[in-house]
Amino acid sequence: MSDVMTAPRAKVEEKLFQNRYLVDAGRPHIKVRPHTTPSASLLSMVTLCPAGCYSKSESGQVEVAADGCLECGTCRIVTRKTGEVEWNYPRGGFGVLYKFG
Amino acid sequence: MGEFSKPFDAIVVGAGPSGNAAAYTMAKEGLNVLQIERGEYAGSKNVQGAILYADALEKIIPEFRDEAPLERHVIEQRMWTMDDKSHTGMHYRSDDFNEEKPNRYTILRAQFDKWFSSKVKEAGALVLYETTVTELVKDLSGKVIGVRTDRQGAPIMANVVVLAEGVNGLVGQRSGLRNEVAPESVALAVKEMHFLPRETIEARFNLTGNEGVVIEAMGTITKGMTGTGFLYTNEESISVGIGCIVSDFAESDSSPNELLEAFKNHPSIKPLLEGSECKEYAAHLIPEGGYKAIPQLTGPGWIVVGDAGQFVNAVHREGSNLAMTTGRIAAETVVSLTRKREEMTAANLAEYEKRLGQTFVMKDLKKYKGIPDLLHKNKGNFFGTYPKLISQAMQTWFRVDGIDKVSKEKAIFRNFRETRTLWGMMGDAFRVVRAWR
């Protein structure tokens, strides 16, 4: 496994840099509802989001920055029961624009 | 959008393979069709491995090979079971696949969907891009009679709405036409596009001209989660990706990106990607719940096709062919009802399900209806224990080290017995046979 362990981890941010986006400035399509303690489901998104959009703040809340969102919908499905995430598709034409898909 | 004063014969939500198949089929038969797609162009929101199955498309556009953007026709399939350092492979390669009308092609979905969409327009449908359908409009009886979009204006009316909105289709789920997708019934897959000169790809994979190779892999690469990895050769690029069931991901501490990095750096994969340049990173959900996860498919004024209906055969990694076939058959049902001037009632549209039942789509999904549960309950064994045991057995068998073959055989069987127990293996065999037949 030495190969795997020592391989430099490609950061998600660097990967997203390869993608094309049309960001709908000021109108994020994903919002985390205000909370004091995140559920285990919401917390799991910090690791699970393939675009690394979720992070945990110093005071323990989960935040989302959806500019690099790949629009997979995983967070919507994972947090559906807790209702902590408000999820909509971006307005028509906005968001990720896959060149190859 | 007050300009659409007369109701359309049909509105299609989404321009992926199922929506395009439906819109094309209806428009070609003379129906007045509106298709609405949220992307800047068809394909801009769509992600797939991607393999195109000729048979399903041929039934819609027989001459597609002359004009569709195709990458390579598949002549070789490699099925791998992997542990951390090895793969044990079953490869099938045949010159028979170098036929006049090849059976499977690799494609790039953004380009393919754009082409398919151009055919839809040629057939006479009106296609609105950059428009997100936000909700369905119903009459007092609950019948769907149109849609609202994120553009200003009055709702757009139609006799029937074909929901080809994909696995994460919000319109149908929020309107209560079907249950919300469960984390156990979908896989999250991440994929990268790696570019290399075509000569390099051909030399590396032993290919000539437009021949292509497909690798499907399972094993410790998914760290005990239910999932698979894949690597497909395109003309001048390689699609490489990995996916696991979302509920497995949520219970683990694995990140999809790190899983993909580990797969790319596996000693069996790394040399295949050597020197390539990554130009895109994508993520998408794949419906994997199978037959039992198929939702209600029709109702008054609406009909569901493609991923939105969970039409994916996870065992055979088929989806786009099920999407195109369900889109076509839904369209044919609508065409025949329109010609007979019949209403788009739940009872009349149910003809779609009847017709689907006679195709490979329902027959295959029914055949494998037990597989998702089987894998879910035995993931540790199927995606960890067995791949490791197989690798160890292979290595014991092939390593020449002065130990006699009878002792080697005994060591191999002992390893299986002690790791998984005889009862365990018999149970697994029984469960696999029962789920497979």
Image: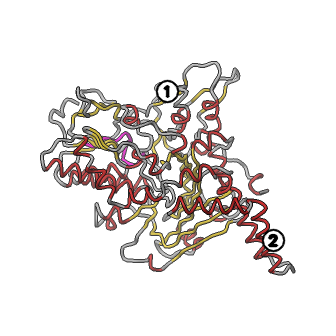
Q: Nearer the viewer, residue B56 or A67?
A: B56
Q: Locate residue B416 relative to residue B308 in the image: left or right.
A: right
Q: Residue furthest right?
A: B402
Q: Residues within 10 Å of mark 1 (few under 14, many from 20)?
A: some
Magenta region, residue range: B34-44
State which quarter of the image contains the N terminus of chain B.
Answer: top left
User: Picture coordinates of residue B198 (x, y %)?
Assistant: 52, 68
Give the number of the disc on residue B411: 2
Callout 2: helix, strand or loop?
helix
Secondary structure, magenta segment, majority class: loop
Please say whether residue B297 is visible from this viewpoint: yes
Residue type at mark 2: give it: Ala
Q: Nearer the viewer, residue B216 or B112?
A: B216
Give the number of the disc on residue A86: 1
Mark 1 belongs to which subunit? A
Q: Nearer the viewer, residue A55 or B180?
A: B180
Tell me the mark number nearer the camera, choosing from 1 and 2: 2
Q: Residue at position x 16%, y 47% from top? A: B338
Give the Cα distance between marks 1 and 2. Answer: 56 Å
Give the mark count: 2
* Above-or-below relation of B112 to B64: above
Task: Determine which quarter of the picture holds residue A61.
Answer: top right
Q: Residues within 10 Å of mark 2 (few under 14, many from 20)?
A: some
**Residue B9 magenta-drawn?**
no
